[in-house]
């Protein structure tokens, strides 16, 4: 028999604020997000400053961070077979804390090496994949459907804030404590996250498991499920298109700002830091705009704004202050767009995914989305060398907006409120038996 979470009032803001289990979950996410910003700075700094790593080695370190996501689909399939997901979140946090603690320990003993850093990047990434694929089932046990957009907006706001304040705090810690010791702080954030999670009163939804002994067979079933589910198929196609083209262009932005505009590293960092505020604003706007304009329309708007912002830097001409302002504006608009795209789309995906498939769906999205990022970056580099950086940025901007076509041609773009999805059969994406829902039943 499936265990359901305790009933909660479905009244938006007040209900979410009074939802203590979700607030603890939110706190766990927030503290680990700020810790992540420290690691993102500290690992390459250790490689370059302490270990005199070459550019190739630094590139390999970056690749190691992303590599575990290529198997997240299979990790998600394995997670779906586990009856309880909260212990996996706690284990992932404790595992990552232990992995990061090995660096200050090795530095203290004078035995730190690049191979050690590489192993830490891989293992920390693997722990992140386990955490991320285990998150959706816990999320739906804590938040009623009507609050999905608001809850996702809250989580995204904290993540955006970490990208604004996190690098500054992390840089200060690295300056004062040194990079290896600063990782000790990140390890502590994972321990704090685990403490928040283990204290949450939760009754997880226990999906009916098919008992299949073959992980590969279940993974294949998950892929076919997404391919035949109109909501999930459209969301994945849109996200993959947007991610491919934005990485095709964004990988050239620093090079463009440095060589084409002649900006110093300090000014580039200033522009990017100001622009990061757009992500926070977008996360705060996503929920109220979804309620007034419609969930699907906001997702479509974000799918256009996010990549289209890559065309803005091409307009940067004139004095240095104008170039910095234009670059910051491009990043600001892009940040707003990505949140208007992610928050409602993630909420729709959560609503239409059956309990037994949540981690598989999350894993498939991660594998494909993160898998196209290095491909987009590689092709962007080739186009930048052959066509030039400005034309490549324009190609990326126009190509990325094509992602909205998949949403407009599917029921996703027609969703107005989360209640509209109550009449959708999560297993098929079609109207539930005995229900008539014009949004769900409209053929693309």
Image (cartoon, rainbow, N blue to C red):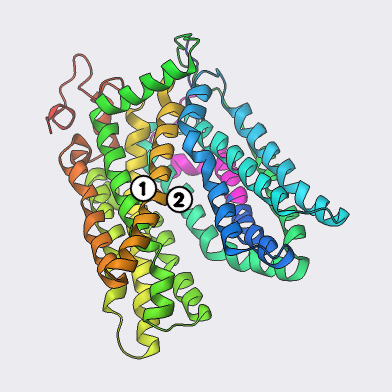
Task: Check the picture and name the quadrant holding the C terminus.
Answer: top left
Residue 259 horizontal/vertical position (percent): 41, 79
In the image, taking residue 421 as reference, residue 187 lies left or right, namely right
Q: Position of residue 351 (x, y in %)?
A: 34, 31
Q: How many marks?
A: 2
Q: Vertically, is 409 above or below 204?
A: below
Relative vertical location of residue 417 with respect to residue 293 in this rendering, above or below = above
- 404 and 114: which one is in front? 114
Residue 1 is left or right of residue 383, and the answer is right
* 8 lies above or below 246: above
Q: Residue at x 38, y 61 (%)?
A: 335
Residue 11 shows up from this direction:
no
Q: Residue furthest right?
A: 109
Question: In the image, what residue occupies the spot 51% across and 18% down?
Answer: 81
* Foreground label between 1 and 2: 1
Callout 1–callout 2 Cβ contact below 8 Å: yes
Against 1, is 157 above or below?
below
Relative horizontal placement of residue 68, taking residue 348 as reference (left or right):
right
Q: Which residue is mark 1?
A: 342
Res. 279 image quadrant:
bottom left
Residue toward you, 163 or 383: 383
Left or right: 343 as drawn, with respect to 58: left
What is the x, y in percent for residue 338? 35, 55
Give coordinates of residue 162: x percent, y percent: 54, 58
Quadrant in which residue 20 is drawn: top right
Q: Is residue 10 magenta?
A: yes
Residue at 59% over, 28% down: 86
Corner quadrant of residue 391: bottom left
The stretch in magenta equals 5-32
Q: Residues within 10 Å of mark 2 (few under 14, many from 20)?
A: many
- The residue that disc 2 covers is 156
């Amino acid at each position: 028999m499936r265990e359901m979470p305790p009933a909660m009032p479905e009244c938006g803001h007040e209900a979410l604020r009074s939802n203590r289990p979700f607030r603890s979950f939110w706190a766990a996410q927030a503290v680990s997000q700020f810790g992540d910003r420290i690691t993102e700075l500290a690992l390459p700094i250790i490689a370059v400053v302490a270990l005199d790593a070459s550019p190739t080695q630094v590139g390999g370190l970056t690749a190691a961070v992303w590599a575990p996501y290529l198997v997240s689909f299979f990790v998600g399939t394995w997670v779906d077979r586990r009856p309880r997901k909260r212990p996996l979140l706690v284990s992932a946090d404790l595992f990552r804390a232990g992995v990061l603690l090995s660096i200050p320990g090795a530095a203290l003993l004078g035995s730190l090496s690049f191979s050690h850093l590489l192993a830490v990047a891989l293992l920390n990434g693997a722990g992140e994949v386990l955490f991320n694929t285990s998150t959706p089932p816990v999320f739906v046990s804590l938040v009623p459907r009507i609050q999905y957009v608001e809850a996702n907006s809250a989580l995204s706001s904290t993540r955006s804030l970490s990208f604004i304040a996190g690098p500054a705090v992390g840089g200060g810690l690295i300056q004062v404590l040194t990079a290896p010791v600063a990782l000790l702080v990140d390890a502590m954030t994972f321990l704090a996250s685990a403490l928040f999670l283990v204290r949450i009163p939760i009754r997880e939804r226990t999906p009916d498991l098919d008992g299949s002994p073959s992980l590969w067979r279940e993974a294949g079933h998950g892929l076919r499920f997404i391919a035949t589910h109109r909501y999930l198929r459209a969301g994945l196609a849109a996200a993959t298109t947007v991610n491919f083209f934005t990485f095709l262009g964004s990988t050239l932005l620093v090079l463009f700002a440095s060589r084409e505009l002649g900006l110093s590293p300090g000014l580039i960092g200033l522009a990017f830091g100001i622009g990061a505020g757009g992500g926070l604003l977008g996360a705060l706007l996503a929920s109220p705009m979804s309620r007034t304009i419609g969930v699907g329309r906001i997702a479509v708007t974000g799918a256009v704004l996010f990549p289209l912002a890559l065309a803005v830097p091409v307009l940067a001409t004139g004095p240095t202050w104008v170039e910095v302002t234009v670059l910051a504006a491009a990043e600001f608009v892009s940040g707003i767009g990505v949140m208007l795209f992610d928050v409602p789309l993630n909420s729709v995906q959560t609503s239409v995914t059956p309990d037994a498939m949540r981690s598989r769906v999350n894993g498939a999205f991660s594998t494909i989305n993160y898998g196209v990022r290095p491909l987009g970056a590689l092709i962007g580099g080739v186009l930048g060398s052959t066509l030039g950086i400005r034309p490549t940025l324009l190609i990326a901007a126009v190509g990325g907006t094509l992602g909205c076509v998949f949403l407009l041609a599917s029921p996703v773009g027609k969703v107005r409120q989360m209640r509209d999805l109550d009449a959708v059969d999560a297993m098929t994406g079609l109207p539930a038996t005995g229900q008539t829902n014009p949004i769900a039943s409209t053929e693309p």
